[in-house]
Amino acid sequence: MGLNIKDIIPRKEIQIENLKGKVVCVDAFNTLYQFLSSIRQVDGTPLMDNQKRITSHLSGIFYRNISLLSDGLKMVYVFDGKPPELKGKIHLIRGKNRDLAREKYDDATSKEDVDLMGKYGRQLVRLDDQMIEESKQLLKAMGIEVVQAPSEGESQAAYLSRVKQEVYATASQDYDCLLFGAPLLIRNLTLAKRRKTFSGWVEIKPELIELNTVLNALEINLDQLICVGILIGTDYNPKGIPGIGQKRALDIVKKYKQPVLIFESVKEQLENLPEEDKFNWQEIFELFHKPKVIDADFKFGQIDENKIKDLLVGEHDFSEERVEKQLEKLRKIKEASKQKGLGNWI
Protein backbone atom coordinates (compact mmCIF):
# COMPACT_ATOMS: atom_id res chain seq x y z
CA MET A 1 0.00 0.00 0.00
CA GLY A 2 2.34 2.70 1.23
CA LEU A 3 1.76 6.41 1.60
CA ASN A 4 -0.30 8.12 -1.11
CA ILE A 5 0.83 11.72 -1.62
CA LYS A 6 1.29 11.58 -5.38
CA ASP A 7 -1.11 14.46 -6.08
CA ILE A 8 0.88 17.02 -4.10
CA ILE A 9 4.42 15.87 -4.81
CA PRO A 10 6.50 17.56 -7.54
CA ARG A 11 8.63 15.19 -9.57
CA LYS A 12 10.49 15.15 -12.85
CA GLU A 13 11.05 12.48 -15.46
CA ILE A 14 14.62 11.38 -16.00
CA GLN A 15 16.42 9.15 -18.44
CA ILE A 16 18.28 6.06 -17.28
CA GLU A 17 21.38 7.59 -18.88
CA ASN A 18 21.23 10.31 -16.19
CA LEU A 19 22.03 7.65 -13.60
CA LYS A 20 25.13 6.24 -15.26
CA GLY A 21 27.91 5.64 -12.75
CA LYS A 22 25.66 6.39 -9.77
CA VAL A 23 25.02 4.14 -6.76
CA VAL A 24 21.35 3.58 -5.95
CA CYS A 25 19.97 1.88 -2.83
CA VAL A 26 17.03 -0.26 -3.93
CA ASP A 27 14.13 -1.07 -1.59
CA ALA A 28 14.37 -4.85 -2.13
CA PHE A 29 10.97 -6.05 -0.88
CA ASN A 30 9.19 -3.28 -2.78
CA THR A 31 11.00 -4.29 -5.95
CA LEU A 32 10.49 -8.03 -5.52
CA TYR A 33 6.75 -7.48 -5.06
CA GLN A 34 6.79 -5.49 -8.31
CA PHE A 35 8.38 -8.44 -10.09
CA LEU A 36 5.96 -10.93 -8.55
CA SER A 37 2.90 -8.91 -9.50
CA SER A 38 3.96 -7.75 -12.97
CA ILE A 39 5.95 -10.66 -14.45
CA ARG A 40 3.06 -13.04 -15.10
CA GLN A 41 1.12 -14.78 -17.81
CA VAL A 42 -1.93 -13.09 -19.34
CA ASP A 43 -4.23 -15.02 -17.00
CA GLY A 44 -2.32 -13.81 -13.93
CA THR A 45 -0.33 -17.01 -13.42
CA PRO A 46 3.22 -16.28 -12.24
CA LEU A 47 6.25 -17.73 -13.98
CA MET A 48 7.07 -21.16 -12.54
CA ASP A 49 9.66 -23.89 -12.93
CA ASN A 50 8.88 -27.55 -13.64
CA GLN A 51 8.13 -28.13 -9.95
CA LYS A 52 5.57 -25.29 -9.91
CA ARG A 53 7.84 -23.05 -7.83
CA ILE A 54 7.38 -19.35 -8.60
CA THR A 55 10.28 -17.75 -10.48
CA SER A 56 8.88 -14.33 -11.46
CA HIS A 57 11.09 -12.60 -8.90
CA LEU A 58 14.23 -14.33 -10.18
CA SER A 59 13.36 -13.42 -13.75
CA GLY A 60 12.93 -9.77 -12.76
CA ILE A 61 16.18 -9.68 -10.81
CA PHE A 62 18.16 -11.27 -13.61
CA TYR A 63 16.86 -9.63 -16.77
CA ARG A 64 15.91 -6.16 -15.53
CA ASN A 65 18.98 -5.66 -13.40
CA ILE A 66 21.29 -6.69 -16.23
CA SER A 67 19.59 -4.02 -18.31
CA LEU A 68 20.23 -1.44 -15.57
CA LEU A 69 23.82 -2.61 -15.09
CA SER A 70 24.32 -2.27 -18.84
CA ASP A 71 23.15 1.33 -18.51
CA GLY A 72 25.90 1.95 -15.97
CA LEU A 73 23.99 1.83 -12.67
CA LYS A 74 25.48 0.43 -9.47
CA MET A 75 22.87 -1.03 -7.16
CA VAL A 76 22.65 -1.98 -3.50
CA TYR A 77 19.55 -4.02 -2.62
CA VAL A 78 18.35 -3.35 0.93
CA PHE A 79 16.24 -6.13 2.45
CA ASP A 80 13.67 -5.79 5.23
CA GLY A 81 14.31 -7.24 8.65
CA LYS A 82 11.79 -7.49 11.50
CA PRO A 83 8.95 -5.01 10.95
CA PRO A 84 7.80 -2.69 13.74
CA GLU A 85 4.83 -3.98 15.72
CA LEU A 86 2.74 -1.10 14.39
CA LYS A 87 2.92 -2.63 10.93
CA GLY A 88 0.68 -5.47 12.06
CA LYS A 89 -2.42 -3.57 10.92
CA ILE A 90 -1.24 -3.21 7.33
CA HIS A 91 -0.28 -6.89 7.20
CA LEU A 92 -3.78 -7.81 8.37
CA ILE A 93 -5.36 -5.59 5.70
CA ARG A 94 -3.12 -7.06 3.00
CA GLY A 95 -4.06 -10.57 4.08
CA LYS A 96 -7.76 -9.74 3.83
CA ASN A 97 -7.22 -8.17 0.42
CA ARG A 98 -5.46 -11.31 -0.79
CA ASP A 99 -8.31 -13.48 0.46
CA LEU A 100 -10.82 -11.30 -1.39
CA ALA A 101 -8.66 -11.35 -4.53
CA ARG A 102 -8.48 -15.16 -4.29
CA GLU A 103 -12.28 -15.40 -4.25
CA LYS A 104 -12.56 -13.10 -7.27
CA TYR A 105 -9.77 -14.94 -9.09
CA ASP A 106 -11.47 -18.30 -8.54
CA ASP A 107 -14.75 -16.85 -9.78
CA ALA A 108 -13.06 -15.42 -12.88
CA THR A 109 -11.38 -18.78 -13.48
CA SER A 110 -14.69 -20.61 -13.35
CA LYS A 111 -16.04 -18.16 -15.95
CA GLU A 112 -12.83 -18.41 -18.02
CA ASP A 113 -12.52 -14.61 -17.90
CA VAL A 114 -8.83 -14.22 -18.73
CA ASP A 115 -8.78 -10.43 -18.23
CA LEU A 116 -10.17 -10.67 -14.69
CA MET A 117 -7.94 -13.65 -13.97
CA GLY A 118 -4.97 -11.49 -14.91
CA LYS A 119 -6.22 -8.60 -12.76
CA TYR A 120 -6.87 -10.59 -9.59
CA GLY A 121 -3.97 -12.99 -10.08
CA ARG A 122 -1.58 -10.08 -9.69
CA GLN A 123 -3.11 -9.32 -6.30
CA LEU A 124 -2.23 -12.75 -4.89
CA VAL A 125 1.40 -11.84 -4.36
CA ARG A 126 3.27 -13.39 -1.44
CA LEU A 127 6.99 -13.25 -0.71
CA ASP A 128 8.30 -16.19 1.31
CA ASP A 129 11.65 -16.94 2.97
CA GLN A 130 12.90 -19.13 0.12
CA MET A 131 12.20 -16.41 -2.44
CA ILE A 132 14.06 -13.88 -0.29
CA GLU A 133 17.10 -16.13 0.19
CA GLU A 134 17.31 -17.05 -3.49
CA SER A 135 16.96 -13.40 -4.45
CA LYS A 136 19.94 -12.52 -2.25
CA GLN A 137 21.98 -15.36 -3.75
CA LEU A 138 21.24 -14.29 -7.31
CA LEU A 139 21.96 -10.62 -6.64
CA LYS A 140 25.32 -11.41 -5.03
CA ALA A 141 26.21 -13.77 -7.88
CA MET A 142 25.52 -10.89 -10.28
CA GLY A 143 27.90 -8.63 -8.37
CA ILE A 144 25.09 -6.55 -6.85
CA GLU A 145 25.57 -5.69 -3.18
CA VAL A 146 23.02 -6.81 -0.58
CA VAL A 147 22.37 -5.11 2.78
CA GLN A 148 20.21 -6.71 5.46
CA ALA A 149 18.30 -4.06 7.40
CA PRO A 150 17.42 -4.68 11.05
CA SER A 151 13.88 -3.45 10.39
CA GLU A 152 12.33 -1.53 7.47
CA GLY A 153 14.24 -1.76 4.20
CA GLU A 154 13.00 1.62 3.01
CA SER A 155 14.15 3.39 6.19
CA GLN A 156 17.55 1.68 5.93
CA ALA A 157 17.86 2.66 2.24
CA ALA A 158 16.89 6.25 3.08
CA TYR A 159 19.48 6.31 5.88
CA LEU A 160 22.26 5.05 3.61
CA SER A 161 21.38 7.62 0.96
CA ARG A 162 21.70 10.33 3.62
CA VAL A 163 24.95 9.28 5.27
CA LYS A 164 26.90 7.54 2.50
CA GLN A 165 28.54 10.03 0.19
CA GLU A 166 28.79 7.46 -2.59
CA VAL A 167 25.03 6.73 -2.59
CA TYR A 168 23.10 8.92 -4.99
CA ALA A 169 19.47 8.01 -4.29
CA THR A 170 16.90 5.54 -2.96
CA ALA A 171 14.83 3.56 -5.45
CA SER A 172 11.31 2.54 -4.42
CA GLN A 173 7.70 2.99 -5.45
CA ASP A 174 6.80 4.07 -1.91
CA TYR A 175 6.70 7.74 -0.96
CA ASP A 176 7.35 6.69 2.64
CA CYS A 177 11.05 6.93 1.83
CA LEU A 178 10.67 10.72 1.81
CA LEU A 179 9.25 10.67 5.34
CA PHE A 180 12.34 8.69 6.38
CA GLY A 181 14.43 11.55 5.00
CA ALA A 182 15.65 10.14 1.68
CA PRO A 183 17.21 13.16 -0.10
CA LEU A 184 16.44 11.72 -3.55
CA LEU A 185 13.79 9.15 -4.43
CA ILE A 186 13.65 7.38 -7.79
CA ARG A 187 10.38 5.75 -8.79
CA ASN A 188 9.79 3.35 -11.72
CA LEU A 189 13.46 2.37 -11.86
CA THR A 190 12.95 -1.39 -12.01
CA LEU A 191 9.60 -1.39 -13.81
CA ALA A 192 9.27 -2.53 -17.40
CA LYS A 193 9.70 0.30 -19.89
CA ARG A 194 6.21 -0.28 -21.24
CA ARG A 195 3.00 -1.25 -19.45
CA LYS A 196 -0.25 -2.48 -20.90
CA THR A 197 -3.37 -0.59 -19.80
CA PHE A 198 -7.02 -0.70 -20.82
CA SER A 199 -6.33 2.09 -23.31
CA GLY A 200 -3.23 0.43 -24.76
CA TRP A 201 0.50 0.42 -24.08
CA VAL A 202 2.05 3.33 -22.16
CA GLU A 203 5.70 4.18 -21.70
CA ILE A 204 7.03 4.07 -18.15
CA LYS A 205 9.85 6.49 -17.37
CA PRO A 206 11.85 6.82 -14.15
CA GLU A 207 10.88 9.75 -11.94
CA LEU A 208 13.18 11.69 -9.64
CA ILE A 209 11.74 13.28 -6.51
CA GLU A 210 13.98 15.64 -4.52
CA LEU A 211 13.04 16.02 -0.87
CA ASN A 212 14.21 19.64 -0.66
CA THR A 213 12.21 20.51 -3.78
CA VAL A 214 9.14 18.86 -2.25
CA LEU A 215 9.48 20.75 1.02
CA ASN A 216 10.09 24.06 -0.73
CA ALA A 217 7.17 23.59 -3.11
CA LEU A 218 4.78 22.66 -0.31
CA GLU A 219 6.25 25.33 2.00
CA ILE A 220 6.66 22.88 4.89
CA ASN A 221 9.51 21.09 6.70
CA LEU A 222 10.18 17.38 7.13
CA ASP A 223 8.35 17.17 10.48
CA GLN A 224 5.29 18.66 8.81
CA LEU A 225 5.57 16.28 5.85
CA ILE A 226 5.54 13.39 8.32
CA CYS A 227 2.38 14.87 9.84
CA VAL A 228 0.78 15.06 6.39
CA GLY A 229 1.55 11.37 5.95
CA ILE A 230 0.09 10.39 9.31
CA LEU A 231 -3.11 12.35 8.66
CA ILE A 232 -3.59 10.63 5.29
CA GLY A 233 -2.49 7.19 6.45
CA THR A 234 0.81 5.30 6.48
CA ASP A 235 1.68 1.62 6.83
CA TYR A 236 1.54 2.21 10.59
CA ASN A 237 -1.99 3.71 10.53
CA PRO A 238 -3.36 2.53 7.17
CA LYS A 239 -6.70 4.34 7.25
CA GLY A 240 -5.42 7.65 8.57
CA ILE A 241 -8.29 9.98 9.43
CA PRO A 242 -11.31 9.43 7.16
CA GLY A 243 -12.26 12.52 5.21
CA ILE A 244 -8.76 13.96 5.22
CA GLY A 245 -7.11 13.63 1.83
CA GLN A 246 -3.79 14.88 0.55
CA LYS A 247 -4.70 18.52 -0.03
CA ARG A 248 -6.72 18.92 3.14
CA ALA A 249 -3.95 17.34 5.19
CA LEU A 250 -1.50 19.82 3.69
CA ASP A 251 -3.83 22.72 4.53
CA ILE A 252 -4.16 21.55 8.15
CA VAL A 253 -0.41 21.16 8.55
CA LYS A 254 0.34 24.58 7.09
CA LYS A 255 -2.31 26.20 9.31
CA TYR A 256 -1.25 24.69 12.64
CA LYS A 257 2.46 24.10 11.87
CA GLN A 258 3.50 22.35 15.11
CA PRO A 259 2.85 18.58 15.34
CA VAL A 260 1.16 18.89 18.73
CA LEU A 261 -1.18 21.62 17.46
CA ILE A 262 -1.81 19.76 14.19
CA PHE A 263 -3.09 16.67 15.95
CA GLU A 264 -4.87 18.68 18.64
CA SER A 265 -6.94 20.18 15.79
CA VAL A 266 -8.14 16.70 14.77
CA LYS A 267 -8.46 15.31 18.29
CA GLU A 268 -12.19 14.72 17.98
CA GLN A 269 -11.81 12.78 14.72
CA LEU A 270 -9.05 10.69 16.31
CA GLU A 271 -11.18 9.87 19.35
CA ASN A 272 -14.14 8.89 17.16
CA LEU A 273 -12.20 6.38 15.09
CA PRO A 274 -13.21 2.72 15.43
CA GLU A 275 -11.07 1.02 18.06
CA GLU A 276 -9.13 -1.02 15.49
CA ASP A 277 -8.24 2.14 13.51
CA LYS A 278 -7.12 4.34 16.41
CA PHE A 279 -3.45 5.30 16.55
CA ASN A 280 -0.92 7.18 18.64
CA TRP A 281 0.49 9.83 16.34
CA GLN A 282 3.55 10.46 18.54
CA GLU A 283 4.55 6.80 18.28
CA ILE A 284 4.30 6.87 14.48
CA PHE A 285 6.08 10.22 14.30
CA GLU A 286 8.96 8.73 16.31
CA LEU A 287 9.21 5.72 13.98
CA PHE A 288 9.79 8.01 11.01
CA HIS A 289 12.23 10.19 12.95
CA LYS A 290 14.25 7.46 14.59
CA PRO A 291 13.87 4.23 12.61
CA LYS A 292 15.96 1.19 13.52
CA VAL A 293 18.90 1.30 11.10
CA ILE A 294 22.56 0.27 10.97
CA ASP A 295 25.75 1.60 9.44
CA ALA A 296 26.51 -0.68 6.52
CA ASP A 297 29.67 -0.71 4.48
CA PHE A 298 29.46 -2.39 1.12
CA LYS A 299 31.60 -3.25 -1.85
CA PHE A 300 30.53 -4.70 -5.17
CA GLY A 301 31.57 -8.32 -5.52
CA GLN A 302 32.66 -10.44 -8.45
CA ILE A 303 30.29 -12.06 -10.92
CA ASP A 304 29.82 -15.77 -10.24
CA GLU A 305 28.59 -17.27 -13.52
CA ASN A 306 28.50 -20.82 -12.18
CA LYS A 307 26.28 -19.78 -9.26
CA ILE A 308 23.93 -17.96 -11.64
CA LYS A 309 23.66 -21.00 -13.94
CA ASP A 310 23.20 -23.42 -11.04
CA LEU A 311 20.39 -21.33 -9.55
CA LEU A 312 18.53 -20.36 -12.71
CA VAL A 313 19.18 -23.22 -15.16
CA GLY A 314 19.95 -26.12 -12.83
CA GLU A 315 17.51 -25.35 -10.02
CA HIS A 316 14.70 -23.46 -11.73
CA ASP A 317 14.69 -24.58 -15.39
CA PHE A 318 15.52 -21.23 -17.02
CA SER A 319 16.51 -21.44 -20.67
CA GLU A 320 20.25 -22.06 -20.77
CA GLU A 321 20.51 -20.23 -24.09
CA ARG A 322 18.76 -17.11 -22.78
CA VAL A 323 20.80 -17.11 -19.57
CA GLU A 324 24.01 -17.44 -21.55
CA LYS A 325 23.08 -14.41 -23.68
CA GLN A 326 22.58 -12.36 -20.55
CA LEU A 327 25.83 -13.59 -19.05
CA GLU A 328 27.60 -12.33 -22.14
CA LYS A 329 26.23 -8.88 -21.33
CA LEU A 330 27.55 -9.21 -17.78
CA ARG A 331 30.99 -10.11 -19.15
CA LYS A 332 30.99 -6.98 -21.29
CA ILE A 333 29.99 -4.87 -18.28
CA LYS A 334 32.80 -6.42 -16.24
CA GLU A 335 35.34 -5.84 -18.99
CA ALA A 336 34.26 -2.23 -19.45
CA SER A 337 34.66 -1.60 -15.71
CA LYS A 338 38.21 -2.98 -15.80
CA GLN A 339 39.13 -0.74 -18.69
CA LYS A 340 37.89 2.28 -16.77
CA GLY A 341 39.87 1.26 -13.70
CA LEU A 342 36.82 0.79 -11.55
CA GLY A 343 37.93 -2.50 -10.06
CA ASN A 344 34.98 -4.25 -8.46
CA TRP A 345 32.50 -1.49 -9.31
CA ILE A 346 30.84 -3.40 -12.11
Image (tube, helix red, strand yellow):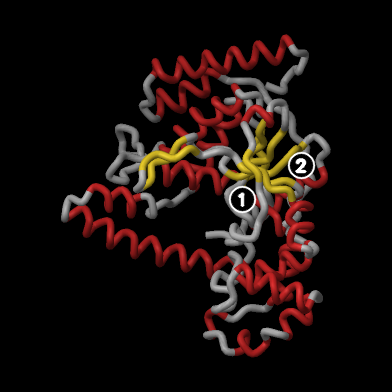
Q: Is residue 342 above or below residue 48?
A: above
**Residue 148 visible, this orientation:** no
Which residue is disc 1 drawn over?
80
Check disc 2 and give the amino acid type.
Answer: Ala
Which residue is disc 2 drawn over?
296
The residue lying furthest to the left in this view is 111
Q: Residue at x 41, y 38 (%)?
A: 56
Q: Residue at x 80, y 47 (%)?
A: 162
Q: Is residue 346 above or below residue 50?
A: above
Which x, y percent locates residue 146? 65, 37
Left/right placement of residue 215 relative to residue 99 reads: right
3D distance between C-alphas at marks 2 and 1: 14 Å
| Element type at mark 2 | loop
Q: Residue at x 66, y 33 (%)?
A: 75
Which x, y percent locates residue 68? 59, 28
| Element type at mark 1 | loop
Quarter holding residue 189: top right
Q: Residues within 10 Å of mark 1 (few under 14, many from 20)?
A: many
Q: Residue at x 60, y 53 (%)?
A: 174
Check disc 1 and give the amino acid type.
Answer: Asp
